[in-house]
Image (cartoon, rainbow, N blue to C red):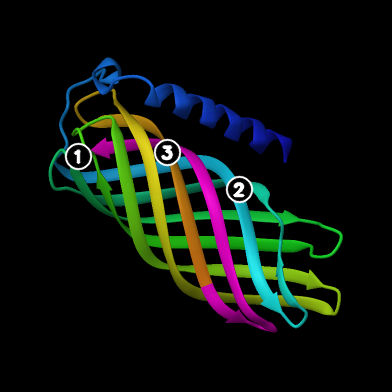
C-alpha cells in the first residue's frame, strides 16, 4: 500500500518537527482544558498478527494499514484527561504462505498526562477489543471472530488553535490478545500507529 507508507512517512517527519519546538511557540490560541473532551484520530501504522497453530508459531508479517478512531472524556485539569476511546484498522493482504484478512477493534479506558499542562503528552490505556481474522494456512483456512483484552501506550504533541480546539500528532502502540481462536492455540495483534488528532474542549 504505497500511499499509506508515504502518509506514515509524512506523519513521522511532522511529529519529529513538532517535538523540537517549545509549546509556547505553537500555542496559537488560548489555553483552556476543562470539562468534556471529544477527539478524532486518523492515520496509519504497522500491524502484525502473531499466532500459534498446529504447525507451531507464525505471524502475518508486518503490513501497513490506515487507522482511525474517536474518544470522549473529561479534563480534570490542564494536566490530566480521562477518556474512553474506540480505534480500529482493517487490512487484507496476500503472502506466499499465510494470506490474511483482519479487522481489529480496540476499546480503551485511557489517561492522558500533560507534564507541562500543554504541548507534549503521554497516554496509557487498558480495555477490550475484537479480532475478525481469516488466515489461509496450507492445511486450510482459519476463520474466526473473538474478543480479548488489550492495552495501549502513546505519546504526542498538541497545538492549541483556540480556547476550545487543538490539533496534534500522536504515536500509539496497541496490543490485543484474544487467546485461542478456531484451530489456533493463541492469536494476538500488535500495531504501531501514527495519527493526526483533533480535540474539542467543550
Q: CA distance from mark 2 to mark 3?
A: 14 Å
| Nearest to N terminus: mark 1 or mark 3 | 3
| Nearest to N terminus: mark 1 or mark 2 | 2
Q: Write down the residue under mark 1.
A: 202
| Nearest to N terminus: mark 2 or mark 3 | 2
> Residue 54: x and y, percent?
75, 83
Secondary structure beneath dot 1 equals: loop
> Residue 19: x and y, percent?
38, 26
Residue beneath the point at 81% across and 73% down = 137
Q: Is residue 114 left or right of residue 178?
A: left
Judging depth in this view, the residue of 73 and 9 nearest the camera is 9
Residue beneath the point at 69% across and 34% down = 3
Q: Which mark is residue 170?
A: 3
Q: Is residue 103 left or right of residue 149?
A: right
Secondary structure beneath dot 3 equals: strand
Residue beneath the point at 51% across and 71% down = 177
Q: Which mark is residue 22?
A: none
Q: Write down the residue under mark 2.
A: 46
Secondary structure beneath dot 2 equals: strand
Residue beneath the point at 34% across and 43% down = 39
Q: If the image is split into quadrants, where does the N terminus sit?
A: top right
Q: Place residue 151 in its image quadrant.
A: bottom left
Q: If the image is split into quadrants, where does the C terminus sit?
A: top left
Q: Place residue 107 in its image quadrant.
A: bottom left
Mark 2 crowdedness (10 Å alpha carbons): few <14, some 14-19, many ≥20:
some
CB-based contact (under 8 Å), mark 1 and mark 2: no
CB-based contact (under 8 Å), mark 1 and mark 3: no
What residue span does the magenta drawing correspond to?
178-202
> Residue 146: x and y, percent?
55, 76
**Mark 1 or 2, closer to the camera:** 2
Instruction: Please say if 149 is above or below 109.
Output: below
Judging depth in this view, the residue of 91 and 17 nearest the camera is 17
Amino acid at each position: 500500500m504505497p500511499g499509506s507508507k508515504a502518509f506514515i512517512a509524512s506523519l513521522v517527519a511532522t511529529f519529529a518537527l513538532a517535538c523540537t519546538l517549545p509549546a509556547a511557540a505553537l500555542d496559537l490560541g488560548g489555553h483552556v482544558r476543562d470539562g468534556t473532551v471529544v477527539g478524532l484520530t486518523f492515520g496509519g501504522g504497522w500491524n502484525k498478527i502473531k499466532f500459534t497453530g498446529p504447525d507451531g508459531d507464525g505471524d502475518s508479517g508486518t503490513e501497513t494499514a490506515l487507522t482511525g478512531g474517536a474518544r470522549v472524556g473529561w479534563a480534570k485539569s490542564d494536566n490530566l484527561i480521562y477518556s474512553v476511546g474506540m480505534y480500529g484498522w482493517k487490512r487484507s493482504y496476500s503472502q506466499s504462505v499465510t494470506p490474511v484478512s483482519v479487522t481489529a477493534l480496540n476499546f480503551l479506558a485511557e489517561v492522558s498526562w500533560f507534564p507541562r499542562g500543554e504541548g507534549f503528552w503521554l497516554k496509557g490505556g487498558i480495555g477490550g477489543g475484537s479480532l475478525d481474522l481469516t488466515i489461509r494456512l496450507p492445511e486450510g483456512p482459519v476463520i474466526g471472530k473473538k474478543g480479548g483484552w488489550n492495552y495501549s501506550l502513546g505519546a504526542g504533541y498538541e497545538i492549541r488553535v483556540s480556547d476550545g480546539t487543538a490539533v496534534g500528532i500522536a504515536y500509539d502502540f496497541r496490543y490485543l490478545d484474544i487467546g485461542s481462536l478456531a484451530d489456533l492455540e493463541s492469536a494476538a495483534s500488535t500495531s504501531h500507529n501514527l495519527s493526526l488528532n483533533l480535540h474539542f474542549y467543550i
